[in-house]
Image: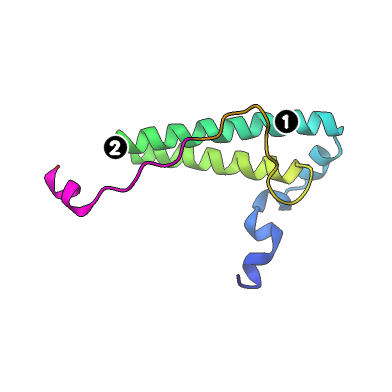
Amino acid sequence: MSVRSSKAEVRNPILTLPSVARLRALSPDARLALQDILLDIQNDARLRAERSWRNRKPPVAAYWAACGVYAGHIARAIGPGPGRRQRTGVPKMPPAPAALSSKEITRC
C-alpha cells in the first residue's frame, strides 16, 4: 500500500466533511442505529446495482453502486472504530456468482 492510500481521508473522503464531527457527537446508541440503517442501505444499493448491471442498464447500476459506496463510507465514518463490525442477526450478502467461462460467453 502506498503512503497516499494509507491515509484514512483518501480511503474515505467523507471524513473530510465538517458535519462528520456532528455525527460522531451523537450518543453511541444513536450512532449504532444510524450505522445499521446505512449498512442496510449499502447492501440494498449493491443488490440493485448488480440487478441493473444484469439487465444491461449501466447508468442505473453506476448510480446504485455509488449510493452503496457513500452509505458505507458514512457508516464507517461514524462507526465504533477501525475495521468492520460484524452485525448479528442480519443475513450476509450472497456470494457473487461465478464468472462465465470463455466457452459460455461465445455461446450466448
Q: Is residue 99 magenta?
A: yes
Is 99 displayed left or right of 91 in the figure? left
| Residue at which label 2 appears | 56
Q: Position of residue 76 (x, y in %)?
A: 69, 44
Q: Quadrant of the N terminus?
A: bottom right
Q: Secondary structure at mark 2?
A: loop
User: Magenta span covers which residues?
Assistant: 94-107
Rendered view: 48 above or below 80:
above
Residue 22, image x and y in percent? 82, 39
Q: How many numbered marks are there? A: 2
Q: With 8 as the anchor, is 107 left or right in this view?
A: left
Q: Nearer the viewer, residue 29 or 60?
A: 29
- Crowd rating for badge 1 (residues with CA inside 10 Å; few <14, some 14–19, many 20+): some
Q: Residue furthest front?
A: 89
**Residue 73: percent from left, percent from top:** 64, 45
Q: Which of the labelled discs sits on residue 34, or is there none?
A: 1
